[in-house]
Image (cartoon, helix red, strand yellow):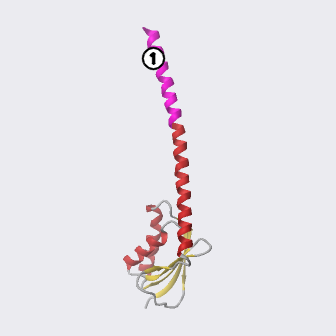
Amino acid sequence: MATTYELIIYGKVQHVGFRDRIENIGRGLGINGIIYNYKDGTVRILANFSSERKKRLFKELIKELEEDDKLIKIDKIEEKALNTYIEFPEGINRISADDLIELNKKLDEGVKYIKFIFGELEEHKKILIEMKDTLYEIKEILKNNSNAQK
């Protein structure tokens, strides 16, 4: 018989598409449970595991997400056996306290990333202009040296 566990994932895991990725992993492994954002910034998963091996694989695949997605940063995964069995619908299912609030938080997060990207582009533009000016100066020096040698 499967046992229900609570997995608490710490790190940058909210508003980065993390829960969607977990739903896909759970579906692929045939794991049933729920996933939700918690007010302390963690993501919580309640899930049934029929074996230690499947639970270990699920946690390993979760940890690998940060290698594939640079927005995700996992500090640690805490595991608690609930010593009970909760029957969940098939798959890992997301629970949202308020979908509109969640959407607004994701949009705000997206705006922050866009502003960061534009800031980086401005910095790169300044560097390129400086490089262009330096190359122009080098060209003039080489031109003057060439004329002086003639």
Number of marks in picture? 1
The magenta stretch spans residue 137: yes
Q: Nearer the viewer, residue 142 or 78?
A: 142
| Percent position of residue 144, x then y | 48, 15
Q: Secondary structure at mark 1?
A: helix
Q: Is residue 65 above or below residue 117?
A: below
Give the residue drawn at x 48%, y 25%.
Answer: 136
Q: Main secondary structure of the magenta part?
A: helix
Q: Residue at x 51, y 79 (%)?
A: 95
* Viewport quadrant of the C terminus: top left
Assign the N terminus to one quadrant of the image: bottom left
Taking the image as drawn, is residue 15 in sight? yes
Q: Amino acid at mark 1?
A: Lys
Question: According to the image, label 1 marks what residue?
Answer: 143
**Relative image position of residue 110 (x, y in whole percent):** 52, 60
Q: Residue furthest front?
A: 100
Magenta residue span: 128-150
Left or right: residue 101 compared with residue 139: right
Quadrant assignment, res 65: bottom left
